[in-house]
Image (spheres, rainbow, N blue to C red):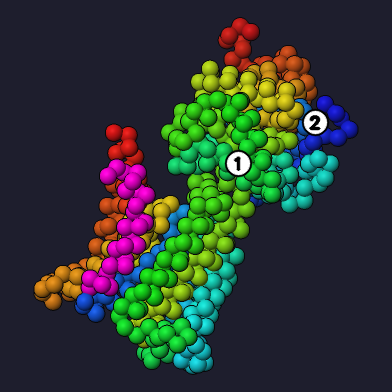
Amino acid sequence: MSEATPLLELASVRAGYGHAEVLHDIDLTVGEGELVAVIGANGAGKSTLLKTIVGLVPVRSGTIAYRGARVATPRPERLVRKGLALVPEGRLLFGPMTVRDNLELGAYGAGRERRAVTTRALARVNELFPVLEERADQPAETLSGGEQQMLAVGRALMSEPRLLLLDEPSLGLAPLVIAEIFSALDELRAQGVTILLVEQDARLALRHADRGSVMRTGRVVLEGPAADLLADESVRTIYLGAWHQEGS
Amino acid sequence: MNARTLRALAPLIAVALALIVPLAVSDRFLLKVFTFCGINALVVVGLALLFGYAGQVSLGHAAFMGLGAYTSAYCTVELGWPWLLGFVAAGVVAALGGLILAIPSLRLKGYYLAMATLGFGLLMSLAFIQAEPITGGVDGFSGIPFPSIGPVEFRSASSLYWLVWGAVGIAVLVAHNITSLRPGRAMRALHGSELGAQACGVDIVGVKVRTFVVSALMAGLAGALYAGVVGFISPSLFTLTASITFIAMTIVGGTSSLAGPILAAVALTLVQYSDALIPGLPRETAQTIQSYQEDIYGLAIVLIVIFAPRGLAGLWKRRSAGNEAS
């Protein structure tokens, strides 16, 4: 990680819905080229964190900076144009539209170079997830859960993002499919894409991440290199209980 | 003829049918009924963009139609403007009305947006009654001249038919261009998932506002055409019932389609004029059908929602896909 110029930096961020404050004094940095995992139990505030970064939940205090510049009023569509893409929880694909149309929509905000970006990004997505090329003319709603998740990631990649935010990409998927998705994430990181991953499956996320942050009731309670968190006894006990059952 | 060929030929068949009507129909009243079908189709093309493609419900489209109708009537009768100028003014005023309503309302979603447009529709219904010096109040606005463009005046039933369906044709071309290009993709994305669309970089508020304005403009132009065709307008024409009728036509016609809603607009308009359509139909029977008109619309919506949620257009697509697969 390049400590001097984090790609994304949250400082003392408080955010919430209505009167309820969900995030309390969140500090988080994501360096260029890193894969950072945010783990925690259900309701810890992980998804709210991503929604706050893209502007879907208002910031009450604190600052969010992207590429060194403060994002005063974040809006998802503006951030996409600045190279930040979100793969939302539940995928939110456009079901009746074809796979190709879904992917092309991912390059919607690419501006004047849209045609070139679409061609280039489509080739990259098809290389990463060849099944999407095979299913190009199928409505997205007819894909399997795993293929839909691949399409959601692929759609986000169509804007050629520098920073990819993923919300629970393993949710409801079979282990083999999860392995395929995470292998693609590894490949993306190798290509230089920075990834902020929110994931309930802590072991899986930390195994693929460079660094991790543990959230509990809207606060970051622990952070550090992923390998250290994997070895941390308190993390193992509280968040990775399944390991003991598996004897790992 | 296979499904793909039929689909390719469908627009040509539709245009041919529209062209044949004035040649095949000698009854002036029946021709006027088909002209009314065109006026409703024009409103529904706009509503198909807003509701069918972008997924935004409007229960106030009759108000935009009314705005257009009264603007055109006032400009031509009171200000002595040429009809074409009044027609343009009708579109502009309705579009401005759409913009004024859209900017605050379109941050709302689903039921809340429907309620806001419903409120707007009710407010405008009252305004059409209360603004008596301009609208003529409950007595309505009469003496509206026939449409004319330069020296050409549209007085005969067939010329009015051509004018109205010509406007529908232009509206369909505009709408088809919108839906088949980038804005159309954004609208369909918006319909699918607002957050999903935002995640793709779609400015959802901008898309909603633009679609709302175009949709209101088409309704306003339809209102101006109605005023010119009939020569008389009154507040009872631009009520909540009319707005719901337009929504019914769009739902029955189907989402993400222009042809389906136009077909539904024609079919459901004809229900109102069953006596003109079926020669020899006893007057009492025709009146009975007309008195059940809203029930027929309601039943059509219920049946479509249960058995064909994507409307007539969805049924057609499903059938075409089935034929191609077999």
Specify whether B213 is left or right of B25. Answer: right
Answer yes or no: is residue B214 visible: yes
Name of the residue lying farthest toward the right: A4
Q: Is residue A144 above or below residue B125?
A: above
Query: Element under label 2?
Result: strand
| Distance from Cα at disc 2 to Cα at disc 1 | 24 Å
Quarter of the image where one finds residue B253: bottom left
* Disc 2 and disc 1 on one polypeptide chain: yes
Residue count near mark 1 (Cα–Cα under 10 Å), binned few <14, some 14–19, many ≥20: many
The amino acid at mark 2 is Gly
Mark yes or no: residue A38 visible: no
Task: Look at 24% across and 67% down and name the residue there.
Answer: B271
Element at label 1: helix
Q: Is residue B253 left or right of residue A224?
A: left
Residue named by callout 1: A106
What's the magenta region? B1-25
Residue at 35 percent across and 48 percent down: it is B7
